[in-house]
Amino acid sequence: MDLDDWRSRINDLDNRILQLLNQRAEAALQIGDLKRRQDAPSYAPEREAEIFRRLTEAAAGPLSAEAILTVWREILSACRALESALTVSYFGPQATFTHRAALQRFGTSVSYQPAKTIADVFDDVERSRADFGVVPVENNTEGAVNVTLDRLIDSDVLICGELRLEITQNLLSRAGALDGVKRVLSHPQGLAQCRGWLAAHLPDVTTEQALSTAAAAEMAAVDATVAAIASDLAAELYGVPILRAGIEDNPHNSTRFLVVGRHPSGATGRDKTSILFAMRNEPGTLYRILEPLARLGINLTKIESRPAKQRPWEYVIFVDVEGHRDTPPVSSALREIGERTLFLKVLGSYPAV
């Protein structure tokens, strides 16, 4: 076959793919109608996780599993939009890493709503101004995002998803060279993730905190003496050249994000449950509280403490465990933990990544 033959072959395949996509869209419309009659949410994290897992396992090449997931993410996003319009609030403005995480989870066929603060994202979901929210919760270099943990204590929203995003930090500036940079701006996490690089290359330059990495890029766009630590998406969106790329100190820098909503997620067989609890300040208390997890064979994947603001020198403990709250082992463990704590709050069960 020559080039024209192969192009004709691709045209035929494209037509077949288009026909199948429209058939899938018709099925999505019917599903949307059923969900509306049953008052069921249009976004089902457990169902989408099952689709992605099945496709990943079936991927035999030459397309990589990552490439297939990228394509299917947009297919699901477009079909979900046919079922019902979806609004997602995220810690903005546009081009923050949280914005990128939201796009990675929900695709482009969604109404995105930037929020000025992480607390505002929770408010948007609680007050039904958004169906879901996306917030950062921890970075593997700088640790927990305390604002998110604090809002989880007080909020009625549920965690219904998680994702991890590789974070590449870039120095954005209209200055032609490093010696033209007089100030470096970024979100506190961005500055902290590049602390070593800044000390080595811009030791005498002032660093200042901004509300977000994207807000810093906005300022760098209008002042050539300012450099921002931000994403390549921010560089593109705000028209600021990348002066130096990949300046994060940890080459494996990544951030975990949570998807929060008002409806619980169903079990997938590969889930995670997040809880928080308060305990008495007595020797051995934490051991006794967590003992059911070890006895029932439930893996604990994360533990984090935050001060209880109402009572000095007492703490709230955040714990992530493997499994869904509706499965017998996790349900039994949560019941025992609840009996051994001052209070227990289940933040949500959701598909693990």
Image (cartoon, rainbow, N blue to C red):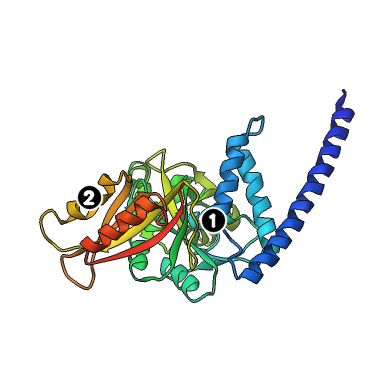
* CB-based contact (under 8 Å), mark 2 and mark 1: no
- Give the residue at the far bottom of this rendering: 127
User: Looking at the picture, does residue 121 appear above or below residue 77?
Assistant: below
Few, some or many residues within 10 Å of mark 2 (<14, 14–19, 20+): some
- Give the residue at the far top of this rendering: 1
Q: Can you tell which quarter of the image residue 277 is in?
A: bottom left
- Label 2 residue SS: helix
Q: Which dot marks residue 21?
A: none
Locate residue 168 relative to residue 21 in the image: left or right: left
Residue at 41% over, 39% down: 252
Residue at 66% over, 45% down: 71
User: Looking at the picture, does residue 1 appear above or below residue 151?
Assistant: above
Amino acid, disc 2? Glu
Is tag 2's residue or tag 1's residue first in the polypeptide sequence?
Answer: 1
Q: Can you tell which quarter of the image residue 341 is in?
A: bottom left
Does residue 234 appear in the picture of this structure? no
User: Looking at the picture, does residue 71 appear above or below residue 154?
Assistant: above
Question: For this rendering, which residue is in front, 218 or 327?
Answer: 327
> Which-is-in-front pick, marks 2 and 1?
2
Q: Which dot marks residue 45?
A: 1
Question: For this rendering, which residue is in front, 148 or 294?
Answer: 294
Residue wearing tag 2: 291
